[in-house]
Image (cartoon, rainbow, N blue to C red):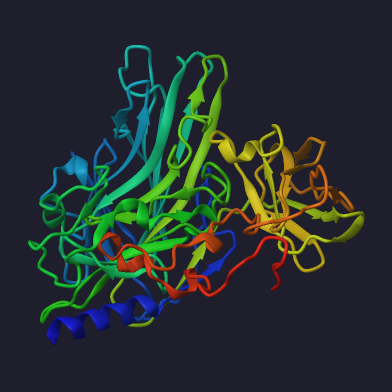
């Protein structure tokens, strides 16, 4: 009964986490100093942000939490919050707690982006921004990449803003970079994972998973009788079950259960926008898995393979900012948090329409985006550039804001219609400029009238969900009723037609 009550408490804790995403200028991706804000000098005002730099460590404390980095490598080695001396797994080596990494080369080498220089970008009472950087040279055997990892701690905010500036110069040798991510190995006490209101569960420990039999591939195991929690026995654990599409992957995290001395603590990763992720809004990516491990995936070949454009050629300079991402810590039953996205101060204002069977109608809920120039649909395999996506309203209108200056093509697709749209016009975004393209017409490709169609061309497999999965190959996190279709529905070709 005690265990059930505690899990109910955890579930309530996760359900009541409310995220308010406000697109405003709070975090700059440049090295420009973040301006100070005036605070009331009353006794209840948040304490000033304190910076303590020592020979091998850097510690920042804002009175709500304390974070420690290794210097100059840039590894995040400690986060002290509430009753936990370290939210990260202190039993791990310093290189295995909080880190950026990249998989590169033909052999898939892991590089944890260890840096060589430390610099304080901003230090005021209101915020501290730290830089851990490295410049690649021809004698360096690591990934051919200039790296600048940034961390921002603000007054009165229990969390860390993070982003990285990655750059390849023209003379850097060609290489593959097939994966880029942020990794956090949390304290073992974090045993409850939440991906959304409906996808959350108690998780097995790493040791329990290790001693469970594998299925057809190494990532999937059947949790055996050595699992302490009877609810988990016989369940399948597979990190790919916890994937989300980029457009929906904005918040996920873990909860450490409460005890008599300490309240429950939440560790949340918030990504308010996705322009820096690869593959566009519909590419699926990993979120969290047994460890407990929390991930932020920026680029990978997951679900696609080498068709993703992950080859970086000599002679073609490249630079990209990954992030911002926000670590948020909480320990209350009801918490409202405010998160800002990167602000560019530019806007693209368009109208978009589609054509079908000779009739023009509004493209309701069409996905429309700006991505690097290429062929129709090329955004799905793009890794190197930025992508900015939105959806049309019921009249087919849309507006794309906060676009990074540069050259783009405009792409789109319409749920319910096959094919990819590309506007045959290069679009150059300039600071402070608006572009109005007027009405755009999409004529879906057709070779003749449709005789029969099963499913809807909406880039999901919702209509094909198996209503009764094999019971010993299930994970209860995948049993959300909203994902199941009406199993009483039957089609007879030529006699029954789909209606909604």
Q: Quadrant of residue 387?
A: top right
Q: Is residue 23 left or right of residue 453?
A: left
Residue 292's place in the image compared with 156, above or below, is above
Q: Which residue corresponds to the image point at 51% horizontal and 45% vertical from the top-left?
A: 277
In the image, residue 201 lies at what x, y percent?
29, 69
* Residue at position x 11%, y 64% in the image: 227
| Residue 311 in picture, x, y percent from top left | 49, 24
Q: Is residue 472 visible?
A: yes
The quadrant of the picture occupied by the N terminus is bottom left
Work out whether 288 lies above or below 203. Answer: above
Q: Is residue 189 above or below residue 241?
A: below
Is residue 462 left or right of 389 when viewed as pictured?
left
In the image, 316 versus 239, the foreground residue is: 239
Image spot of residue 3 (x, y percent): 15, 81
What residue lies at 81% left-to-right and 54% top-to-bottom? 350
In the image, 428 versus 496, the foreground residue is 496
Res 48 visible: no
Answer left or right for 284 relative to 46.
right
Number of numbered discs: 0
Nearer to the camera, 113 or 235: 235
Quadrant, the C terminus? bottom right
Percent of width and height locating residue 338: 48, 69
* Residue 384 position by quadrant: top right
Q: Residue at x 56, y 22 (%)?
A: 317
The residue at the far right in this view is: 358
Q: Is residue 181 left or right of residue 398?
A: left
């Amino acid at each position: 009964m005690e265990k059930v009550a505690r899990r109910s408490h955890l579930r309530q804790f996760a359900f009541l986490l409310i995220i308010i995403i406000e697109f405003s200028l709070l975090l700059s991706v440049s090295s420009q100093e973040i301006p100070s804000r005036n605070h009331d000098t009353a006794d209840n005002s948040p304490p000033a942000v304190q910076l303590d730099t020592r020979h091998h460590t850097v510690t920042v404390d804002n009175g709500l939490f304390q974070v420690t980095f290794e210097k100059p490598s840039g590894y995040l080695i400690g986060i002290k919050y509430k009753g936990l001396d370290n939210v990260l797994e202190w039993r791990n080596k310093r290189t295995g707690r909080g880190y950026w990494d990249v998989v590169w080369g033909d052999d898939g080498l892991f590089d944890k982006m260890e840096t060589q220089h430390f610099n304080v970008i901003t230090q005021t009472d209101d915020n501290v921004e730290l830089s851990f950087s490295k410049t690649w040279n021809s004698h360096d055997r690591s990934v051919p990449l200039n790296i600048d990892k940034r961390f921002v701690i603000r007054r009165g905010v229990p969390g860390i803003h993070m982003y990285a500036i990655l750059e390849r110069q023209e003379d850097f040798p060609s290489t593959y970079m097939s994966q880029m991510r942020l990794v956090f190995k949390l304290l073992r006490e974090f045993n409850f994972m939440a991906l959304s209101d409906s996808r959350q569960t108690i998780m097995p420990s790493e040791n329990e998973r290790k001693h469970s039999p594998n299925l057809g591939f190494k990532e999937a195991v059947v949790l055996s009788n050595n699992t302490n929690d009877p609810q988990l026995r016989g369940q399948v654990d597979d990190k790919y079950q916890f994937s989300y599409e980029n457009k929906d992957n904005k918040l996920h995290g873990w909860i450490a259960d409460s005890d008599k001395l300490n309240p429950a603590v939440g560790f949340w990763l918030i990504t308010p926008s996705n322009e820096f992720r690869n593959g566009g809004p519909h590419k699926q990516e990993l979120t969290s898995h047994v460890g407990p491990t929390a991930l932020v995936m920026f680029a990978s070949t997951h679900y696609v393979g080498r068709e993703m454009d992950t080859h970086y050629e000599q002679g073609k300079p490249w630079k990209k900012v990954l992030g911002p991402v926000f670590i948020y810590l909480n320990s209350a039953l009801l918490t409202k948090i405010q998160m800002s996205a990167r602000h560019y101060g530019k806007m693209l204002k368009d109208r978009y329409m589609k054509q079908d069977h000779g009739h023009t109608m509004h493209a309701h809920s069409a996905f429309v985006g700006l991505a690097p120039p290429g062929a129709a649909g090329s955004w799905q395999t793009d890794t190197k550039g930025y992508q900015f996506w939105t959806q049309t309203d019921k009249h087919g209108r849309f507006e794309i804001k906060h676009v990074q200056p540069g050259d783009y093509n405009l792409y789109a697709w319409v749920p319910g219609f096959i094919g990819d749209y590309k506007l045959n016009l290069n679009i150059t975004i300039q600071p402070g400029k608006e572009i109005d393209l007027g009405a755009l017409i999409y004529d879906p490709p057709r070779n003749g009238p449709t005789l029969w169609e099963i499913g809807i061309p909406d880039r999901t497999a919702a209509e094909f969900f198996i209503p009764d999965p094999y019971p010993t190959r299930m994970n209860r996190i995948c049993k959300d009723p909203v994902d199941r279709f009406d199993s009483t529905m039957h089609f007879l070709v030529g006699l029954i037609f789909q209606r909604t």
